[in-house]
Image (cartoon, rainbow, N blue to C red):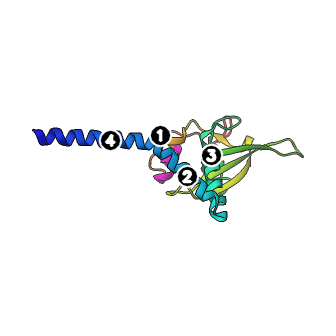
Amino acid sequence: MHYLLAALVTLAGLYGIGLLTSMVLGRRLIAMMERLVERVPLVQTIYGATKRFLNSLQKPPVSGQRVVLIAFPSPEMKAVGFITKVMTDPDTGRELAAVYVPTSPNPTSGYIEIVPLDQVVQTDWGMEEAMAFVMTGGTNAPDTLRFSHRGQP
């Protein structure tokens, strides 16, 4: 009985130390590592771009839902994508969406497509649903999916 109590107290103590460390020391360690990475020219460029990309996925886009379908790689096919930025064509005034199309099963590699915003198909998927869909090769998909704009065949 004493051994069980000692094991539980030890586990609780280790958990508490880990929690405290991750809150205080973990932040300091991450900040120190980021400062170190900033000193290495090529690594800093890649790390900084990746960090900005992940931060952009956490913020909502300017308009509409972030998870969309676009015609890719051909007009008859659709790919799941994430709107990362909405831009305007200065000549026509047309809104354009920068859409990141992740590859399966590794969503950190993918394609950037610039698509007219009126050609993206809005979904009702959340980021978690879309990432699960991509990472499982489509096996984790809902039973229904809007494939085209409302009113289009």
Task: Give the label, 3 or 1, closer to the camera.
Answer: 3
Distance (Cα) linking label 3 and label 1: 21 Å
Classify 10 Å Cα crowding around label 1: few (below 14), some (14-19), many (20 and above): few
Disc assigned to residue 15: 4
First to last magenta residue range: 130-137
**Residue drawn at (64%, 60%) of the image:** 39
Distance (Cα) linking label 2 and label 4: 24 Å
Task: Give the label, 3 or 4, closer to the camera.
Answer: 4
Residue 2 spot, x, y in % from top left:
11, 39
Viewer-nearest residue: 128 or 136: 128
Tell me which numbered mark, 1 or 2, is placed earlier along the sequence: 2
Position of residue 78 relative to residue 58, above or below, is: below
Residue located farthest toward the right when viewing the structure as drawn: 91
The residue at which mark 3 appears reads as: 82
Distance (Cα) linking label 2 and label 3: 31 Å
Q: Amino acid at mark 4?
A: Tyr
Disc assigned to residue 31: none
**Residue drawn at (50%, 50%) of the image:** 29
Q: Quadrant of the N terminus?
A: top left
Viewer-nearest residue: 151 or 6: 6
Can residue 116 be seen here? The reply is yes
Distance (Cα) linking label 4 and label 1: 41 Å
Pointers 4 and 1 in contact (C-beta within 8 Å): no
Tell me which numbered mark, 2 or 4, is placed earlier along the sequence: 4
User: Does the magenta run of residues contain 132?
Assistant: yes
The residue at which mark 2 appears reads as: 32
Distance (Cα) linking label 3 and label 4: 37 Å
Disc assigned to residue 143: 1
Mark 4 element type: helix
